[in-house]
Image (spheres, rainbow, N blue to C red):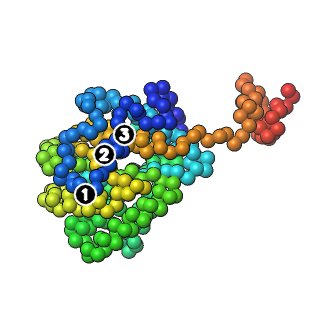
């Protein structure tokens, strides 16, 4: 992976110019998404232009941290990060993936969307398909919708009995606790928009032929159940926001703020991990001598001679 150098930030710490978003946006016990000021910008006093500039600066920091994570994974480390994105249609999940994760090396990111379960998936436990999509060591995984569909859509549409939903909350908490114990940092984000903002965004899609592919009749059907979905989110967040896998509630009417917030949340999460650069498992000085010996002719040393140099530290004929 090519490494971006950043001189603006300390790659070992989050941006101290911003209040910790992980504290400001942490889901409050007993709170409802219905009470969120969706146009608010907690932790940010500037406007859109300044936010975009700050997001780009944070992107350099995020890129460095992600490369450290990736390098550790290549060296046998076990850590990974899972970003879970949820929100009503048009809340900006896809934009987060493009604009935030687009600032880091794509080799170190995996993105998965979870739609209606297939017949095969339904034949397994609801977490089966999720386990198969978890990020490997050294990667940032992004779930655009996730296992929470099985306690959101399933609850609102009464797809399974209420007692099954109850068991799923417990299953999710245990699942995420095991992920955290195994080295996966879980960051769950609820992007909250107002019905009015969604109305405007859906209208823009309908007004543009090149955006019709993003529209589905189900968007309007889900919109008609707005109160039910809000209630389902409230219960899910209340039941599954834990110390090891917290929920963060991000006002998302202003796309630029939501992108800034998620970028900062990721920077804070990664900055909390011990992401030292892996120590070389070879003799660096010997490798430098071998490289110097081939400065004028790349074939000056045979493969066996290169191996002998790195192991023994002597350049033949020196």
User: For numbered disc 2, what is the local secondary structure?
Assistant: loop
- Give how far across and how far down residue 255 sits, in percent: 25, 39
Q: Is residue 273 above or below residue 7?
A: below
The residue located at (81%, 34%) in the rendering is 313
User: For numbered disc 1, what is the local secondary structure?
Assistant: loop
Q: Nearer the viewer, residue 235 or 202?
A: 235
Structural distance between the alpha carbons of marks 3 and 1 = 22 Å
Residue to which mark 2 is pinned: 25
Residue to which mark 3 is pinned: 20
Q: Nearer the viewer, residue 115 or 21?
A: 21
- Give how far across and how far down residue 233 sits, in percent: 25, 59
Q: Is residue 3 above or below residue 152?
A: above
Residue 40 is labelled as: none
Q: Nearer the viewer, residue 99 or 43?
A: 43
Q: Quadrant of residue 116?
A: bottom left
- Give how far across and how far down residue 53 sits, in percent: 33, 28
Residue to which mark 1 is pinned: 30
Q: Is residue 84 above or below residue 277?
A: below
The residue located at (32%, 49%) in the rendering is 26
The residue located at (31%, 62%) in the rendering is 239
Q: Is residue 293 left or right of residue 262?
A: right
The 10 Å Cα crowd at callout 2, few under 14, some 14 to 19, many 20 or more, is: some
């Amino acid at each position: 992976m090519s490494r971006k150098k950043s001189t603006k930030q300390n790659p070992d710490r989050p941006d101290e110019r911003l209040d910790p978003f992980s504290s400001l946006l942490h889901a409050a016990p007993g709170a409802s998404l219905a009470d969120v000021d969706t146009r608010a910008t907690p932790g940010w006093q500037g406007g859109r232009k300044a936010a975009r500039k700050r997001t780009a600066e944070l992107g350099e920091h995020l890129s460095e941290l992600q490369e450290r994570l990736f390098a550790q994974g290549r060296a046998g480390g076990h850590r990974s990060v899972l970003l879970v994105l949820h929100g009503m249609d048009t809340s900006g999940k896809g934009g987060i993936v493009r604009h935030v994760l687009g600032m880091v090396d794509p080799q170190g990111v995996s993105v998965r969307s979870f739609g209606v379960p297939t017949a095969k998936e339904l034949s397994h436990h609801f977490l089966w398909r999720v386990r198969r999509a978890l990020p490997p060591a050294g990667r940032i995984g992004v779930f655009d919708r996730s296992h929470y569909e099985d306690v959101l859509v399933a609850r609102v549409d009464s797809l399974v009995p209420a007692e099954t939903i109850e068991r799923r909350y417990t299953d999710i908490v245990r699942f995420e606790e095991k992920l955290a114990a195994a080295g996966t940092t879980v960051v769950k984000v609820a992007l909250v928009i107002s019905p009015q903002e969604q109305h405007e965004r859906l209208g823009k899609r309908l007004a543009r032929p090149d955006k019709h592919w993003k529209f589905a009749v189900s968007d309007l059907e889900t919109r008609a159940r707005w109160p039910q979905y809000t209630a389902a989110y409230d219960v899910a967040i209340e039941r599954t926001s834990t110390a090891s896998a917290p929920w963060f509630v991000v006002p998302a009417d202003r796309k630029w703020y939501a992108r800034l917030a998620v970028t900062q949340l990721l920077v804070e999460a990664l900055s909390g991990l011990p992401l030292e650069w892996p120590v070389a498992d070879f003799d660096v000085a010997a490798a430098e001598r071998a490289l110097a010996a081939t400065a004028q002719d790349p074939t000056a040393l045979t493969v066996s001679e290169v191996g002998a140099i790195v192991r023994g530290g002597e350049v033949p004929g020196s």
